[in-house]
Image (cartoon, coloured by chain):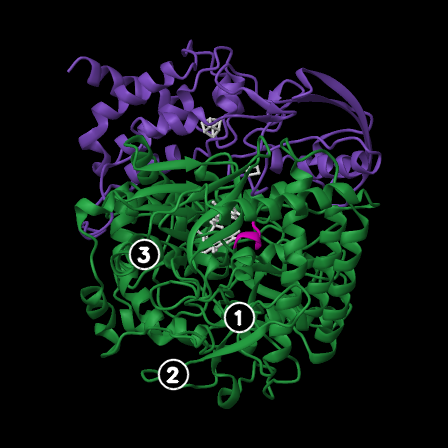
Chain colours: A green, B purple
Amino acid sequence: MTLESKIPAGPLHEKWDRHRFDLKLVNPANRKKFEIIVVGTGLAGASAAATLAELGYNVKNFCIQDSPRRAHSIAAQGGINAAKNYANDGDSIWRLFYDTVKGGDFRAREANVYRLAQLSVNIIDQCVAQGVPFAREYGGLLDNRSFGGAQVSRTFYAKGQTGQQLLLGAYSSLMRQAANGRVTIFPRREMLDLVKVDGRARGIVVRNLVTGELESHSAHAVVLATGGYGNAYFLSTNAMSSNVTAAYRCYKKGAYFGNPCFTQIHPTCIPVHGTYQSKLTLMSESLRNDGRVWVPKEPGDKRPPEQIPESGRDYYLERKYPSFGNLVPRDVASRNAKEQCDKDKGVGETGLAVYLDFADAIARDGREAIADKYGNLFEMYEKITGEDPYVTPMRIYPAVHYTMGGLWVDYNLMTTVDGLFALGEANFSDHGANRLGASALMQGLADGYFIIPYTLGGYLAGASLPEVDASATEFRESEERIREQVDRMLSIDGRRTVTDFHKSLGRILWDECGIARDEQTLEKARADIAELRAEFWQNVKVPGDAADLNQALENAGRVADFMEFGELMVKDAIERKESCGCHFNTAYQTADHEALRDDENFCHVSAWEYTGPDTDPIHHREPLYFENVELTQRSYK
Amino acid sequence: MSSQTINLTLKVWRQNKNNPRGALETYPANNISTDMSFLEMLDVVNEELTAEGVEPIAFDHDCREGICGMCGAVVNGRAHGHMPETTLCQLHMRHFNDGDTIVIEPWRARAFPVVKDLVADSSGLDKIIQAGGYISINAGGPQDGNAIPIARDNAEKAFNAATCIGCGACVAACPNASAMLFTGAKISHLALLPQGKPEAKNRALAMVRAMDELGFGNCSNEAECEAECPKGISIREIARMNREFIKAAFS
Ligand SMILES: Cc1cc2nc3c(=O)[nH]c(=O)nc-3n(C[C@H](O)[C@H](O)[C@H](O)COP(=O)(O)OP(=O)(O)OC[C@H]3O[C@@H](n4cnc5c(N)ncnc54)[C@H](O)[C@@H]3O)c2cc1C
Ligand code: SF4
Ligand code: FES
């Protein structure tokens, strides 16, 4: 099968308009005859489900949590980008497009990114109309701030909880549709398989997490908005239930997986402090607007920060990147933090941290102004560490945060399985090899509110979809396979817990496929994961039974998929013999240790096709064409 | 801050389909680092229980950052424990002492039946929102986000009400198991914004009615909800809701 990106013809700025015109429409009276499954209730899923219901489709919406409002999107802190140019500081759709392509180190499709930048402005309008309480200036107009990788102020925010406010907006629209019967919500359900009939996605099988029952649901199309797979690393900033299972099981059913090795490691997180730790906490990138990053100049200097005079400090980002300073993109900031710690300049008990210091900002603007902007983040930091960041600098270190990789989709957001669409972090789409801050929320909402309503309609209007219901044999077979796997996991009764395996997997991926990688570490990772996976199926201990709420069992399924998927990540990293964005192979770097791309050989998306549990996946390549921006070495100096 | 280890005794509510009435069980929690969060402490205990062949304690959680509203239990009689404005996942063990006994129970309210152990069903809160906790607009084509300026003070008040994470602690803390704080926060958030004004009347009536129908109790001004709310939602939101409700009921 060849990969068809289906990018419309025509000049960049007309592509989406023309495409919308070319897409077939479903007659409003016919929409109610279609059933659509939307898996996920984060920004992407909730906005899609609500909007499709508003158009008149019958929507079934699934999530793992007890309420759709709790999806991982709720935790986003810093903000959402939009090319409104309210600040009159030179922003434009073109600049947002350009920054995103460049920030992604030229590994995303121009057409998709341009559409995203165009739609960004509508998102803000939509959210304001829903009652999202964005931050405002004294004059009553919307306020903006800056994020990494940009020199303009285009980030809209609601204190440090932009994600919760945007999600509550989407959720409220969803609840309105649930009340009028257009959407049925299925909480506490986990999708465990995609069901295809005659080659098309026609339903899913989910496990009811309260009763343990397997439930089959049929539909005319399936929309996956199940988020990212950062938890493959065990420790990440993602919510505990974030998983790859839904996407991975679609991959096993023929959806190609795009760029699995592109994982973003966020520079400003609270450092690891113990083996019992269950997750890492992000300190929003917005803090880099006012915080200054530094380490001691001398290796091994273990004095407390207040005893290190100005002359003994190295504000290394400001020194190395004078024009972007503390606001360099995330991949650059993370790599630099690691580099400093590798030189024994790391701070704190473990030596795996750098300072993020607000002393100058507090002296300049006053404590109150800083509290106004970041109060809740400072409180969170204090709750976790027991230290007061108004007084002593924060200690931060990079942590796994976001996955640019995901199911491969065409311009319509359809995967290689007909009728299966992927939105939000679950697809590989718009961020190339590195996502800019405040762009994930934008992408999720653009996909859900403004893209899928058109492209899904185009698919439904053009496809012939005979009636299928959940009694079809394809559903029974799928349920049978899931039941076998569940029974097998429960029957092993070995000696290691699921969490223990997950921690081992995380360690392997972090050490060997993390901020920096090379051929040797990657080959080692491959062997290590294979060995761990074999042990899992011999020695895992999953207590409890299948017909009950059983959190260990839920986790076991997710960890089993993370292990298989980990091998795919590593394979993808091995095959990409260049550095780009977050994929930093130490063999490919410039003289100043920046990622060195190989545009001749690797200016493509890697899309992987599953071939079986013990055979190598097939590597497909979608070439990327840059007709509107010039491929340059990224520089933030 | 340097970490220490402490030893604790837990008395945890265990309830499942084989034990539908439920009871407190006692477990030791030894060598607990004071840097752990409460949920990490439970993780450690669960790993040990699993190794011993005892079914681990079921508890709800997801973000572990105090924002998703999924976690929550009554700890020594206090919803989310004794620290002010702190969710259970953000409660850290440095606030407990070596030798403490900690009693951990699920939310208890008529409208929140226990599912298993510490897991309760709080889906009634979604139903209250379905009754009117939204602004009726469809996606596509609204006016420019800056078309209606909103005084910063009002925007901030709306934001403060909107910080509710829907955790249900207010219901669990209330002697009447009322959802007034939760409902008041949502009604206030929307009523304070110009976009939410047109529907303010119906919204207040419908949401309050739904709350009654779902089996939540009435408010008798105990203010326990405010004391336990991890987001510092003020009972002023209830007063504002009552004003909205009265305006609506008598017009
Ligand atoms: C701490 C943090 C802060 C962030 N801050 C920002 C920010 O300031 N700005 C920004 O732009 N981005 C930010 N991001 C990134 C952004 O929040 C996410 O990329 C985005 O919210 C993902 O949204 P989503 O809708 O794709 O998926 P999610 O919000 O992850 O939702 C996934 C949904 O799928 C469901 N689901 C998953 N698997 C299954 C399954 N197997 N069966 C059934 N349902 C399933 C879940 O229940 C959930 O409802 C942040 C991320 C983190 C971790
Ligand atoms: S009002 Fe407070 S206690 Fe009640 S649900 Fe909201 S955040 Fe929780
Ligand atoms: S786990 Fe999300 S608020 Fe506690």
User: How many numbered badges does the structure rendering display?
Assistant: 3
Q: Which residue is situated farthest in the front direction here?
A: A473
Helix or strand or loop: what does disc 1 sit on?
A: loop
The chain holding disc 3 is: A
Q: Which of marks 1 and 2 is nearer the N terminus?
A: 1
Nearer the observer, A332 or A557:
A557
Depicted A425 relative to depicted A381: above or below: below
Which residue does the image show at 40% across and 53% down from the upper left? A223
> Where in the figure is residue B41, as x and y percent of width and height?
73, 36
Residues at marks 1 and 3, common chain? yes
Q: Name the residue under label 1.
A: A259
Q: Which mark is residue A625?
A: 2
Under mark 2, the amino acid is Tyr
> Where in the figure is residue A225, as x and y percent of width and height?
44, 52
Helix or strand or loop: what does disc 2 sit on?
A: loop
> Where in the figure is residue A197, as x and y percent of width and height?
44, 54
Q: Is mark 3 within 8 Å of ligand 1?
A: no
Under mark 1, the amino acid is Asn
Q: Residue B31 carries which label?
A: none
Nearer the observer, A449 or A35:
A35
Q: Earlier in the sequence, mark 3 or mark 2?
A: 3
Q: Mark 3 points at which residue?
A: A452
Within the image, what quadrant is residue A450 found in?
A: bottom left
Q: Residues within 10 Å of mark 2 (few under 14, many from 20)?
A: some
Left or right of B8, for residue A451: left
Q: Give the range drawn in magenta.
A: A242-246
Under mark 3, the amino acid is Ile
Q: Residues within 10 Å of mark 1 (few under 14, many from 20)?
A: many
Q: Does the magenta stretch include residue A243?
A: yes
> Where in the figure is residue A504, as x and y percent of width and height?
75, 56
Q: Does the magenta stretch include residue A625?
A: no
* Contact between labelled residues 2 and 1, with CB atoms less than 8 Å apart: no
